[in-house]
Image (tube, coloured by chain):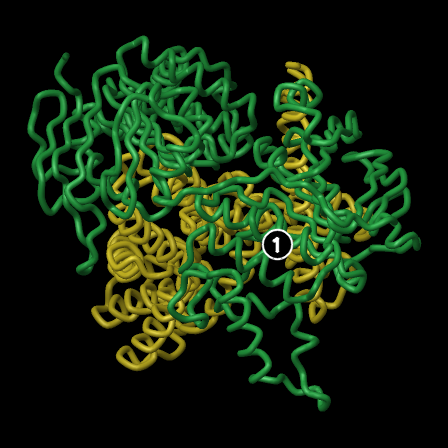
Chain colours: A green, B yellow
Amino acid sequence: MAQALLKATDIQKSFAGVQALKNVSLEIMPGEIHCLAGENGCGKSTLIKIISGVYQRDGGTLEFDGKTMDKFTPIDAITNGIQVIYQDFSVFPNLTVMENLAFNTELAAKRRIVSKKRMRQIAEEAVAKINFQVDLDALVGTLSVAEKQMVAISRALMFNAKLIIMDEPTTALTKKEVQALFDIILKLKEQGIAILFVSHKLDEVFEISERFTIFRSGELVVTGSTKDLDDKKFTFYMTGREFNDKTFVAENLTEQPILETRNLTLDGHFQDISLKLYGGEILGITGLLDSGRTELALSLFGIRPATGGAILRNGQEISIKTPQDAMKQKIGLVPEDRLSEGLFLPQSIADNIIIAEIEQLKTPMGIFDRKKRQEEVDHWVKEMALATPDANNASSTLSGGNQQRIVLAKWLACHPEVLILSGPTVGVDIGSKHDIHAILQQLARKTGMGIIIISDDLPEVLENCSRVLILKDGRIVHEAPTQEIDEKTIVSYMM
Amino acid sequence: MQKSIKKIFGRTEFYVFALLVVLSVLIQFRSGGQFYTANNLVDIASALIVPGIFAVGTFMVIVSGGFDVSFPALASLSVYATTKFMLNIDYSGGILLPLLMVIAIGALLGAFNGFFVGYLNLNAMIVTLGASSVFKGIMQGALNSKQLAVIPEGMRAFGTSALFTATNSQSGLTSRMPMAFLVFVAVVILAWFLLNRTYFGRGIYALGGNPASAKAAGFNVKRTKFIMFILVGMISAVAGFIRVCMMQQCHPTNMLGMEMNIIAGVVLGGAAITGGAGTLLGCILGTLLIVMVENSMILLGVPTTWKSVFVGALIVIGTGVSALQVLRANRSASRARTMTKEGAK
């Protein structure tokens, strides 16, 4: 066996007495694509920061490229060939691609006077390495997320990187962009560069990595070859729990659709959407990022009112122009971007839960009923199994999965009859994902609620929905019961 | 070619310039041909000197992602201390010594701001609000400021010396173009070079765009802010000095309150209030627009008491339009992306 490029042994790190890493080890071979997985708070980020010199480890040894690394700074890490591409890419949106690429090199050379010629040369060399076609004079802020990522990768490659660490690089990318990224990763591998790919999406782990390491609560759970890994094992390693996922089968459907649209149109986003939602079923809507799926959800909830067509509720035509209209019709929306649209992060968990039903929490005199509020809050914290010691803590103290549960609780507290969820488990860890799915299935089965899941996570749609609609360029291109369709077929309709 | 034309049309500077042209034609028309006269143009240029120099300093701070509201107080204190000291020692020499002294005091006071904003990483707006009060207090308390009706001869001579004199052929009115205009030009050129051709200047843009990335890229963020505030202090002190020379008296409080219009002009010229974006050209055009409105209302037949209403309206509409412009540019950029994506299919 060749010598490992990175060899971290028995690494320990504590913050204020809490052990974030308990004797974890990680080995990466030269030119290897290694995946590091684990749920939020498992210590992945802490280890990355130790490897890149941001944190100092409390114990253990770290060897890179045959050298022992002790007490080193981020700059030392870079000069040794370790590069990290963070989720925000650390780019300057207000400056040109050329400047973004050239700054590091020029500053490292302690230059004082700007030379556009030299900067262009540096930038051209950088993008040539991964064959990245881009206007060097464009402002980085006008580029797409994928292009920004390419800028960050090109920049990382300029320092003779031997190991590139990518922190959840696919979070904001479309399927096609992910594919393009994987092509580049494979190209880097050919050049002998090792990649540490941090992700908790299992399909990606299977597709790209040769070996994997999984952490849980600061401990190493397993490390091995991806070949020996499957769905079930992956989930078990990540969460320490076994899940029996059941494909959802709708029971007790209502005879009449509880929500129906006829030729619903939002100019520039979707046209002629006619769909029926029955009580007790979960309807899946899928499509590419720009297929109009997100806007459809917003229109049904009155945030971006439809410009044409009709919405019917229990057979009656209704008008939804504002979210208040939708709420009166007992329609709830769990939006795609829960951080900006669904939650008041700095506010307490309790206040976030009761915000949508606040009208119901007053005494006949119109005064806020504190006792009733507390009852509601206690009820939902228990119902949703929110992992918090105190519901008065800020919502930002919770993990993504728990935050999503607050958003759900908020809507369930209003007793909606139609619940629309846009990307319900984006950025949510695997354990919470399963819990959320179970909650949704139970809601449809037990309360007869009509649920719409809008998602491009196809396994999620296939597992939880009884029917699926596929959107492309703003139109429904196909509709099928989920038992009669598979992922491949759906993708072929989407593209 | 087409691309560069589009680039020009997409920029705030173009709209500010167009607004300047439209406004000047309107004034020309309404005032019976009084705008485009040699003496009026020289008057406007002369009125631009002090706000223009202030604007350059303010522009730097805004690009770095902060706000400086202390520059009028800083300038007042620097120039008052200098003038009083020169009068006390019966200084009768040239302009150089007082100029050096005022710049030195400006640098010192700027370093005060820079220390708190740069090294202690405090919010620039809060620090400069406090600093403004401190500077005023020192001037009024420690220096016991009152109006100085006489200023040293060297300063007076500089303030009254003219590059050339313009005469209105109709009315026979004359206006002198002050020598100080050259100082304004020099400050602009120096600032342009600093901001666009040195890594110190690019660092100001970088940290206005994303401070964390700036640090990661290897910029010394703390030192950059510190030095920038020293420079801004020096620039502001020069502006205050020129104002005193041109007015030929030193009034301790009459610069105070200028900060709002200066900041408005800079923002009007396209500098992003969130930092990181804007050009010096836009900054000067925006300031010129404010100066022109302030000076030319009288030519339009609008009573001077209404001046502030017009300036205020201009700021709201002007910044509103440029905000819309940015919004539209973003939208068309995202549309272009979707189109190329579809084209790729």
Q: Chain of mark 1?
A: B
Q: Is residue A182 above or below residue A8?
A: above
Q: Position of residue B156 (x, y in %)?
A: 39, 60
| Residue lying at 61% horizontally and 85% vertically, measured from the top left | A369
Q: Quadrant of the N terminus of chain B?
A: top right
Q: Give the residue at x 21% y 57%.
A: A18
In the drawing, does residue B12 fall left or right of residue B190? right
Q: Position of residue A273 (x, y in %)?
A: 83, 36
Whether residue A125 sits left or right of residue A245 in the image: it is left
Residue A360 lies in quadrant: bottom right
Residue B245 visible in rendering: no
Q: Quadrant of residue B115?
A: bottom left
Circle 1 sits on which residue?
B290
As drawn, the residue found furthest toward the bottom would be A365
Q: Nearer the viewer, residue A7 or B83?
A: A7
**Is residue A458 visible to the viewer in this orientation of the structure?**
yes
